[in-house]
Amino acid sequence: MKMLINVPETVVADALRGMAAAHPELAVDVENRVIVRRDAPVAGKVALVSGGGSGHEPLHGGFVGPGMLSAACPGEVFTSPVPDQMVRAAAAVDSGAGVLFIVKNYTGDVLNFDMAAELAEDEGIQVAKVLVDDDVAVSDSLYTAGRRGTGATLFVEKIAGAAAEEGRPLEQVESLARKVNENSRSFGVALDACTTPAKGSPTFDLPAGELELGVGIHGEPGRERRAMMTSREIADFAVDAVVDDLDPRNPVLVLVNGMGATPLLELYGFNAEVQRRLAERGVPVARVLVGNYVTSLDMAGASVTLCQIDEELLRLYDAPVRTPGLRWGV
Amino acid sequence: MLDADFFRRWLTAAAAAVDREAERLTALDSPIGDADHGSNLQRGFAAVVAALEKEEPPTPGAVLTLAGRQLISTVGGASGPLYGTLLRRTGKALGNDAAEVTGEQLRDALRTGVEAVRTLGGAAPGDKTMVDALVPAVDALGESFAAAAAAAERGAEETTGLQARKGRASYLGERSIGHRDPGATSAALLVAALAEAAGARAEAADV
């Protein structure tokens, strides 16, 4: 597999140097792997820190900026960052109002953020944590590590970020973040596996003419393999999986998310089918976001995330945001 | 008696084993994980060896505690905190001051370390994790280092037939059956390195 890299060992550091060059509004510490809003700490404001393995860009580093994250900690590709990064990030952005850790529910991320929270509290930083676990493809949570955190992470970071920007206290920002997660569900499909730089070949074999239903965002295979389906059939399957689980009574935010290698042309076509199916299921749609936001390197495929909202959540979603990956109202 | 040098040899042997087997660990991590177990542990154990050379911790407990901290600070993922906790808690159980420890003390300390891993990760034997290699290894350590290595290897081998209930492989449900667990495999390498370090002590190898 050909890749636009120098050597696999420096992929993350190279990307961080490039990010620093492209975004002077961010302070990028390449050596310690922390991306921080340059104006942090913002007096009186709760800070939001997230992080996770690299390979999901723009998540999380691309969501650092006014209205969203205060800092992000990128790990190695598909590998949780280490506690030292999160503690460093928390110390850099804490104004005294406390820090919210936004953690996708993967064993590695949970363990490292737990350790970091303890260490940060030892340093006198007030820390709250919210877990994102929106992936309905993981059905049997009792016998697994629980549902994975995927597309809903964008909604959690956006809405909690807006609440923090308004000057809300830590416990309110935390409970809003939790509310967004509880009201969000996702389902993903892969048409092709992705290739990690370290391995250099696809992480799993997906024969031509087949697709994986219920994939995560780390190149792990899904729950089920089927003969290739049309955009219409995939939309029916994904929307039904999400709607059956969420059972929304209120309008929803929709994220039609590309996994990295699926062109926007296909994503928009897929969104048309998603919207058709949502209408057939009687789900009112408040906002739609289409694009590559929570990716899995060069995996081909897409995910659908729905987030059930009320007036307050919609207002916070619509609030201004200025980050490399998401930008409106400013 | 086992001195700081013995523990340095153990971790150096572990680093060499991880280097040697990195591609295999990553290959095992591909069908049921995310294809990075080998490279992550390589990075971590290289940092361990570098830190041990630089800081020259004087006691067995200090060697293991430093190594554990290095793994936590450099590996990431789940294996960083889990292996880091294993070594750190084993080291703490040995204490910072004793210049030498007995085989029996090491066995008790390792038991404490493995317990800490189980508490942190929430895994029980049979969940298809590193615990499946570590628990039988500690049980067999009373017999000999070689027996512990053999028990760890057997435990790792037997994960092939298990369905994963923890970690990323658990998302696959029944599809995780038929694949050997990469974490149990690297845990068996760690125990084999312990036997290797003990073997270098010739006839005094057994506990």
Image (tube, coloured by chain):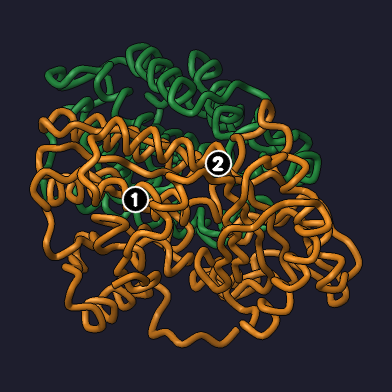
Q: Which chain is orange?
A: A
Report which quarter residue B78 is drawn in. Answer: top left
* Quadrant of the drawing holding the N terminus of chain A: bottom right
Q: The disc numbered 2 marks a residue on which chain?
A: A
Residue type at numbered disc 1: Ser
| Image location of residue B118, percent across then percent down | 49, 22
The first of marks 2 and 1 along the sequence is 1
Q: How many marks?
A: 2
Look at mark 2 in the image and give the residue it sits on.
A133
> Would you call the spot at circle 2 few (<14 residues within 10 Å), some (14-19), or many (20 or more)?
many
Residue A120 on image: x %, y %:
19, 35
Chain assignment, label 1: A
Can residue B54 be seen in this snapshot? yes
- Alpha carbon distance from label 2 to label 1: 14 Å
Q: Is residue A67 above or below residue A57?
A: above
Q: Amino acid at mark 2?
A: Asp
Q: Is residue A22 above or below residue B155?
A: below
| Label disc, if present, on residue B37 of the rendered structure | none
Q: Which chain is green?
A: B
The secondary element bearing badge 2 is classed as loop
From the viewer's perspective, is residue A273 above or below residue A117?
Answer: below
Name the residue nearer the viewer: A144 or A104: A104
